[in-house]
Image: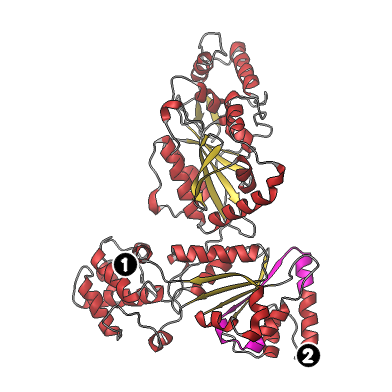
Amino acid sequence: MVPYLSFFGFDEEPFWVTPDPAFLFLSKNHREAFAHLLYGVERRCGFVALTGEIGTGKTTLLRAFFAHLNPAVYKIAYLFNPRLNPQEMLHAVCREFALEDHGESRVLLFDRLNRFLLEENGTGRSVLLVIDEAQNLSPETLEEIRLLSNLETDREKLIQILLVGQPELADLLQRAELVQLSQRISVRFHLDPVDFEDSCAYVRHRLRLAGCPDRDLFPLPALTNIYKFSKGYPRLINTLCDRALLIAYTRENPAIGPETIRDAVHELGWVSSARFPLGRWLWGTVLAAAVFVGLGMVIGYGSRQIPPGEKPLAGTAADGNALLQACPVPPSGAKDGLAGEIEKFRLGLAVRSEGESARAAFDAVANRWGVRKLGSWFVAIPYFQQLVEAAQRRGLEVWIADPSLEELLVYNTPAILEVTLPGLQEKRYLAVTVVDEGRIYIAPSLAGSDHLSVAEVKGLWSGRALIFWKDYRGIYRPRADGRRSADLAGLQNLLHKAAFFQGNETGLYDEPTREGIRLFRRHQGLAQSGGINEPLLILLYQQSDVFQPPRLKLAAAEGNPP
């Protein structure tokens, strides 16, 4: 056991150098690299290249990428540090894909691999070959890998190849004998170290997850020195912070000062200037540091589901019509451009984790309702159910439904859309908060945009939504058996204020009440068989002058969209 754990109140080691999914942290640079990888693989670009200095987190980024890919969709072979000749490479690829390998000739190996790829393609699966430390490959072996990419159908490549390595890989690919391979690499990204902001966030993130009770254990001067000497390399940040904690423990210092960081640098044998300690020291350090492993959870659902047939008829509600008319649909000639925009927005969602998108979406809706946000501590799984429970703790009701976008806009209330991305098991979440002048405002923002068109939202959305509302009168009360009962007097009052009820507010489910419900449902385009339920009450509250729920269409007094 590390001696400083109990001294500082840690539950576990915060800067342990081996990968741990619980310590997932993606910097801005890693998010961008992730987006490039996802783009290249999903678009079947053939070759993708990722380079970066030692210690920037290339290999651990790959682990996150693998965790995000749906194993039912992708078949992955991963080769690490392959110092192999061309024939050995073919044997290694066949073994990784669990193909029979009895030392046959190159021709037989290619034939076996081609049949395997055709079978996988026929079942709808994509095959991905990932070669890490690819800078160690010889030009002859790289040329053999290029020939693998010739295995294709009339319409698409049968195998996608991801080359990962140090900057020397980029130099290697510039050699004249590899020009054909270099020209086939359509997606390239160089991973830089993290910046100062992400360096500080990374340290605090690991401290918090390790159970550190002191949020200021590493004050800003110490964080400044950490970045100064590590230059933002996650592996070095881990090593430096771990040594600094040990030094502080031996001196019984309750906090880490900048001088402790300098002493740690000296003990580690690093230069005492701001130079980054490249070279042999790095080769002798441990292999992995920061963790970037995806959660890969299949989301469970809770709360009430939409009753069959309970959907408003599109274009029947006045507010819904006004919102739809304000959102023009692109002409048919813009389909190719629209597809590109949707692809860009999907990448914008993919680079956020499921929890991050859920938190951003909830906070945007909470802001419209004026209730407490989730904040940075929201890490629960499954996220969909946690969003429901978080809303209920804040006095909001949640209706889980699968309406069309047109129907959703009819309800005129902020909602969270569940988004399914191709090839990913995890979900993403997108809040719809305001509709104004042809724009649907969303959160989190995507590709630098805080609003989308109707067509773009339709292209992203999977069809399931969390529709938030508030039962101001407590009409739709929960019963002991989990079902709902209606306070009919409160319902009669809302119907009366909406001019659909002319009787006395008796609290009885009499004929005037039934007639008022039928008339209101018919006016709103709701199914007549729905009875007293969420869509009925949402629309009644929306039209009441007494209550002021947030609406997608802002009133003039509410000003510009957030």
Pointer 2 residue: 105
Please tell me which residue lies in front, 37 or 235: 37
Location of residue 497 with respect to 24 vertically, above or below = above
- Quarter of the figure that contains the N terminus: bottom left
| Front label number (1 vs 2) | 2
Q: Is residue 491 above or below residue 326?
A: above
In the rendered image, residue 494, in percent from the top left (x then y), is placed at 51, 18
State the count of labels: 2
Residue at the far top: name it.
503
Identify the residue under disc 1: 10
Specify the quadrant that holds the C terminus. Answer: top left
Real-space CA distance between mark 1 and mark 2, rounded to the nearest whole angstrom: 57 Å
Contact check, label 1 and label 2, Cβ < 8 Å: no
Q: Whole-percent x and y of residue 68?
A: 57, 63
Element type at mark 1: loop
Q: Is residue 435 visible?
A: yes
Query: Which residue is drawn at the image coordinates 60% and 19% (left, top)?
Result: 520
* Residue occupying the point 68% across, 46% down: 334
- Write down the quadrant of residue 311 in the picture: top right
Q: Residues within 10 Å of mark 1 (few under 14, many from 20)?
A: some
> For this view, does 397 lie left or right of residue 208?
right
Q: Where in the figure is residue 106, as x and y percent of width and height? A: 77, 88
Q: Amino acid at mark 2?
A: Ser
